[in-house]
Image (spheres, rainbow, N blue to C red):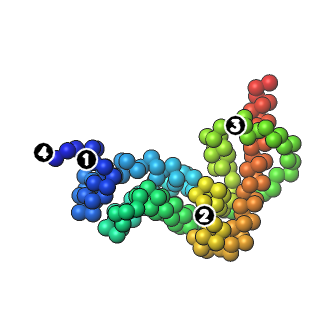
Amino acid sequence: MRKPYSDYSEQELIDRCRKDDSKAQEMLYKRFYAYAIAICMRYCINRDDALEAVNDAFIKLFKTIKTFEHNRLIKPWFRQIVVNSAIDNRRKNLKHANVLDIEDADEPITNHNIISKINAEEILGLLKDLPEMHRVVFNLYEIDGYTHEEIADILEMPSSSSRVYLSRAKEKLRKLVNAHFYLNYERAI
């Protein structure tokens, strides 16, 4: 009697996926879905775009799984597929997006203790308020660890532009954190 697919190790699932076993593909999808959607939500504008990128990533995974090396970990390999799918989705939808770069006229006073008073979920929420290109470069550099040269290749731009977008993203994020803190502080009073 064969054990249930839910009891298979990742390597056993990969081996079965290489044989085009649809039940193994379904189980691998279920195991990595939350991981993939969390990554895509950082890059995509909305949940629908993120879902499309996740599904594209899984299609790429299942098409290329036969080339996956046994001695590698699947999660980092799949993470790269997911990030690339999210970036591809962003590129595809870029022609439909308007890019506005409006600087704030008034900058709140900086309080260096603000970061300790807001949680990671609030910071990730603030990332969504960054202009799209700033958010993508920030995610690639600060969260996913790509170099400016790698970002330049992925986004088809000069590496100097990547540096500028990152700098602007950090400045805008600083302003958003300050504004978020003061807004919530005012409500508490």
Q: Are marks 4 and 2 in contact (CB under 8 Å)?
A: no
Determine the residue positioned at 47% across, 58% down: 76
15 lies left or right of 101: left
Instruction: State which tag comes first along the sequence, 4 or 2.
Output: 4
Instruction: State which tag comes first along the sequence, 1 or 3.
Output: 1
Coordinates of residue 134 in the picture (x, y in percent): 68, 59
52 lies left or right of 3: right
In 3D space, how far apart are the residues under numbered discs 4 and 3 (Cα atoms)? 52 Å
Q: Are marks 4 and 3 in contact (CB under 8 Å)?
A: no
Q: Amino acid at mark 2?
A: Tyr
In the depicted structure, whether residue 17 falls above or below residue 129: below
Determine the residue positioned at 52% across, 53% down: 39
Q: Are marks 4 and 1 in contact (CB under 8 Å)?
A: no
46 lies left or right of 142: left
In 3D space, how far apart are the residues under numbered discs 2 and 3 (Cα atoms)? 26 Å
In the depicted structure, whether residue 73 falls above or below residue 66: above
Coordinates of residue 150 in the picture (x, y in percent): 60, 70
Coordinates of residue 57 in the picture (x, y in percent): 43, 60
Determine the residue positioned at 58% across, 58% down: 144
In the depicted structure, whether residue 37 falls above or below residue 157: above
Residue hosting label 2 = 146
Q: Which mark is residue 172?
A: none
Q: Residue furthest top?
A: 189
Q: Amino acid at mark 3?
A: Ile
Residue hosting label 1 = 5
* SS state under label 4: loop
Q: Which mark is residue 118?
A: 3
Q: Is residue 48 visible in this depiction of the protein?
A: no
Instruction: State which tag comes first along the sequence, 2 or 3.
Output: 3
The local crowd at label 3, few if under 14, some if 14 to 19, many if 20 or more residues have their Cα within 10 Å, is some
The local crowd at label 1, few if under 14, some if 14 to 19, many if 20 or more residues have their Cα within 10 Å, is some
Residue hosting label 4 = 1
